[in-house]
């Protein structure tokens, strides 16, 4: 591919600076934990078993999520129906739910007292057994399928309408379109989606243990908890953190190697019409896919809503205060995250050290929050009071944790804009800010809105490092929800969970919707 | 990255505002300081008389609390660490961070004798499996449980205090046969959760017949919810105890104030807060006795407990037995 024009050099520097910041925020804490460690026992056979299980379940989770997401995203891309927008927005929900809420929601459908087991019992069949590796994968698909669908759907929507028009005039069948237009797009988009889902599944801990049924389902993250909390073996905790970095680097390298640049070209940003997909068979297939995915994702959410609806009005005042803190935190995170991701996305789109940058971007979800949090604690404690720094640190760590997702959302769009308009902009002599304002940002509205929405919602639901730092009066909503659960107040906790779900979806929807103003889809 | 600097400015301001009263800093586990835990009431009660500003700092659970203190070492800001239990005492003592409390502990009403010059109990409880009253063929021992098809949910000893308590319970009751007991329990265990909240949540949702908790758990449902449908199963082997303790830090800036708090901790004012906030037994029975409803709880005949040194010694072995049995 020809070298592109580079209208903004400031962005290049900014992108490199952000990548440096990510590295520092990961490497320094890891180093701090290693330095603080006394003699360590090193990694034993149980640790390596945890590494194997972690990689295996994450591969399976990512493969199934992306594999199912492709046909679902295609169905959503080529159908218009009432409620489609709401459905797509709702799809963000599982991804941002605190683990225990999502698990209880899933169990309400797939558990022993769940609807499916009840139906099976009624038919005289054996109950569904959710506890085991199948439960772990089911939960990870539940969490990540929506993300995969959204990321891949972005790819579909980025194919210019003119291409489909051209395909129609050339008499392309669905199969031809798949071969010439959709598969190249997927080769560009799917590996990145696979990577983020794989990595986020590798740091899973509570889901893997709770649904995995016991110590067989020990993940690296749990081994880190054991090393840190049970044995206070900081050296081993840090080593395991390094193993996570290793997994991320290898996975990143493989994915970059498997990613093909997108050659869809640029269009006039018109709505897409699909003449090829109007056959009855295609319609039925899409309807089935969309309905199945909707039921799979929404039934557990519905359980969360019904459990919490009765309690939400009577929630104690502390919960509302925590909700307010969480809203502020999520808005700060979203802004910070998008601000960090944009220069990095531009740098990546320009093909400079692409593999390295994408891998760095992904590191922040691959490395244990416990190790990073502990390292930050060690570094910052001599300088500031951990309690006072709790919310700012949580904001920064959340922003970095959202970075890979925002990057995934932005990179394809930036690539297209650069490829399509970069030279033109250069020849017109547009300077950096002009280019950003007139060319890039208008074209990135949709992915920017989506990325900011994801970051905001993620921050809203994240328990993360706040637990290491928080003082009594600064709990976020998820923390207060856990506190309620820890105090037997299951009903109030269910109400708080519903509030959390509503707020997360709310911020996601507002950002995502904001990104699609004037858009036909 | 202006935020930490901004935050440190805030801390300075806060520090100056309350500079006149000495600040007593207590590190504890998170659920102690939540609005629904004992923290707020304890703070108000102590501040009435101490002429000080009591500040709680929360750090996860008991194990995370100890890890936090170890990370900070002698430079810790804590004057008191409250929320360790007998399984953590040996490791806490080994840090050399704790001072002698010097408080007269003769008034303790624990089922076992307590002599420890550094750590002072503030509440205690028995681990137990909690079930619905109407559970048929409820087991009355680990052997019966293993032979039954009753489904239980437990916590992981590596990440949860009650999970570790269960490990010790089986070990205390069966010694060298513990591994065998765990093998027998394998098919009863629905799943193992990271913490108590997840396990209890699963039980309440009906995913299991029994959950590892405390004999006092049914008291919450009875007293706070008026729901008498939960009970704890009395096991023939006896029940393992959890004794929660506090200790004062050697390097405390306010040793007298810290000692004053530890003495206050054993007074009626503190102890009467415990039963219906921490849902445990008070370490010193208050003059007014236990709240109505506690008399309905099961009373184990045998209290099982390893002393802190033994607990620390056998922990790794017990964990390995557990892991080996459940990984098959």
Image: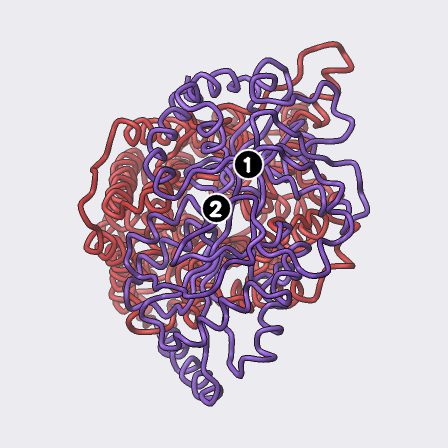
* Residue A512 sits in quarter: bottom right
Which residue in the structure is indicated by mark 1?
Answer: B303
Nearer to me, A187 or B176: B176
Nearer to me, A169 or A35: A35
* Residue A389 sits in quarter: bottom left
Q: Is residue B110 visible?
A: yes
Tally the marks: 2
The chain coloured red in the image:
A
Where residue A202 sits: x, y (%)?
Answer: 38, 37
- Label 1 sits on a secondary structure element that is strand
Q: Residue at x 52, y 65 (%)?
A: A329
Q: Residue at x 54, y 57 (%)?
A: B122
Which residue in the structure is indicated by mark 2?
Answer: A158
Q: Residue at x 60, y 38 (%)?
A: B213
Task: Tell me if A271 is positioned left or right of B72 in this view.
Answer: right
Up the image or down, B64 lies above or below B312; here it is below
Estimate the spatial distance between the alpha carbons at disc 2 and disc 1, rounded to whole Å: 68 Å
Chain letter for the residue marked with disc 2 in the picture = A
- Label 2 sits on a secondary structure element that is loop
Nearer to me, B25 or B236: B236
Q: Residue furthest front?
A: B106
Q: Is residue A520 visible?
A: no
Where residue B88 sits: x, y (%)?
Answer: 39, 47
Query: Which colour style is shown?
Result: by chain
Up the image or down, A44 lies above or below A505; here it is above
Indicate the colour of chain B: purple
Crowd around label 2: few <14 · some 14–19 · many ≥20 (10 Å): many
């Amino acid at each position: 591919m020809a070298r592109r024009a580079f209208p903004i050099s400031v962005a290049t520097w900014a992108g490199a600076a952000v990548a440096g910041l990510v590295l520092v925020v990961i490497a320094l804490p890891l180093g701090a934990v290693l330095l603080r460690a006394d003699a360590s026992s090193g990694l034993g056979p149980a640790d390596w078993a945890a590494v194997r299980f972690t990689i295996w379940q994450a591969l399976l989770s990512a493969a199934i999520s992306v594999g199912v997401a492709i046909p679902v995203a295609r169905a959503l891309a080529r159908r218009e129906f009432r409620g489609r927008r709401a459905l797509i927005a709702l799809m963000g929900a599982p991804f941002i739910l605190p683990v225990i809420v999502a698990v209880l929601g899933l169990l309400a459908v797939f558990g022993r007292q769940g609807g499916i087991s009840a139906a099976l019992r009624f038919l005289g069949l054996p109950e569904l057994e959710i506890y085991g590796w199948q439960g772990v994968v089911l939960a990870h698909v539940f969490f990540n399928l929506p993300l995969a669908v959204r990321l891949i759907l972005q790819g579909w929507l980025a194919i210019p309408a003119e291409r489909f028009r051209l395909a129609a005039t050339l008499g392309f069948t669905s199969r031809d379109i798949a071969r010439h237009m959709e598969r190249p797009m997927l080769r560009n988009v799917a590996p990145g989606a696979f990577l983020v889902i794989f990595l986020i599944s590798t740091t899973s801990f509570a889901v893997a243990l709770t649904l995995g049924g016991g110590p067989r389902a020990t993940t690296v993250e749990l081994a880190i908890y054991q090393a840190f909390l049970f044995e206070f073996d900081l050296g081993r905790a840090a080593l395991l953190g390094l193993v996570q970095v290793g997994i991320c680097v290898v996975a990143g390298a493989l994915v970059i190697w498997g990613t093909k640049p997108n050659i869809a070209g640029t269009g006039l940003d018109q709505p897409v019409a699909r003449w090829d997909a109007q056959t009855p068979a295609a319609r039925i297939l899409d309807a089935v896919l969309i309905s199945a995915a909707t039921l799979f994702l929404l039934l557990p959410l519905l359980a969360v809503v019904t459990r919490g609806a009765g309690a939400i009005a009577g929630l104690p005042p502390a919960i509302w205060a925590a909700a307010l803190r969480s809203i502020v935190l999520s808005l700060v995170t979203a802004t910070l995250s998008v601000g960090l991701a944009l220069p990095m996305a531009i740098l990546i789109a320009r093909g400079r050290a692409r593999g390295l940058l994408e891998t760095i971007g992904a590191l922040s979800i691959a490395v244990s929050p416990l190790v990073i949090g502990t390292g930050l604690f060690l570094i910052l404690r001599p300088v500031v009071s951990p309690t006072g720094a709790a919310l700012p640190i949580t904001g920064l760590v959340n922003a970095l944790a959202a970075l890979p997702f925002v990057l995934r959302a932005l990179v394809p769009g930036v690539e297209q804009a650069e490829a399509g308009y970069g030279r033109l902009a250069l020849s017109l002599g547009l300077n950096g800010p002009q280019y950003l304002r007139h060319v890039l940002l208008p074209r990135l509205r949709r992915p920017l809105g989506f990325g900011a929405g994801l970051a905001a919602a993620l921050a809203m639901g994240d328990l993360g490092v706040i637990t290491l730092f928080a003082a009594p009066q600064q709990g976020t909503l998820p923390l207060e929800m856990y506190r309620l659960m820890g105090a037997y107040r299951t009903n109030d906790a269910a109400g708080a969970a519903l509030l959390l779900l509503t707020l997360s979806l709310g911020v996601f929807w507002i950002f995502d919707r904001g990104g699609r103003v004037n858009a036909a889809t | 990255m202006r935020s930490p600097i901004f935050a440190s400015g805030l801390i300075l301001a806060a520090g100056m505002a309350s500079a006149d009263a000495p600040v007593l800093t207590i590190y504890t586990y998170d659920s102690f300081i939540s609005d629904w835990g004992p923290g707020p009431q304890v703070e108000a009660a102590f501040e009435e008389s101490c002429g000080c500003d009591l500040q709680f700092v929360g750090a996860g659970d008991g194990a995370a609390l100890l890890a936090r203190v170890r990370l900070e070492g002698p430079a810790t800001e804590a004057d008191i660490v409250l929320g360790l239990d007998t399984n953590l005492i040996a490791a806490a003592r080994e840090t050399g961070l704790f001072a002698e409390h010097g408080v007269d502990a003769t008034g303790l009403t624990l089922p076992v004798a307590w002599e420890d010059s550094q750590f002072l109990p503030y509440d205690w409880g028995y681990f137990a499996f909690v079930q619905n009253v109407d559970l048929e063929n409820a087991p009355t021992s680990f052997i019966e449980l293993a032979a039954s098809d009753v489904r239980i949910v437990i916590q992981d000893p590596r990440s949860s205090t009650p999970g570790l308590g269960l490990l010790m319970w089986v070990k205390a009751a069966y010694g060298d046969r513990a591994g065998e007991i765990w093998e027998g329990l394998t098919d009863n265990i629905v799943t193992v959760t990271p913490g108590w909240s997840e396990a209890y949540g699963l039980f309440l949702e009906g995913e299991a017949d029994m959950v590892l908790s405390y004999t006092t758990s049914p008291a919450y449902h009875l007293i706070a919810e008026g729901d008498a449908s939960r009970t704890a199963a009395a096991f023939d082997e006896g029940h393992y105890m959890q004794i929660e303790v506090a200790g004062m830090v050697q390097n405390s800036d306010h040793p007298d104030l810290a000692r004053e708090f530890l003495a206050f901790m054993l007074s009626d004012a503190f102890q009467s807060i415990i039963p219906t906030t921490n849902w445990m037994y008070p370490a010193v029975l208050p003059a007014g006795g236990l709240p109505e409803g506690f008399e309905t709880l099961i009373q184990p005949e045998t209290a099982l407990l390893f002393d802190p040194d033994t607990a620390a010694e056998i922990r790794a072995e017990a964990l390995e037995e557990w892991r080996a049995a459940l990984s098959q």
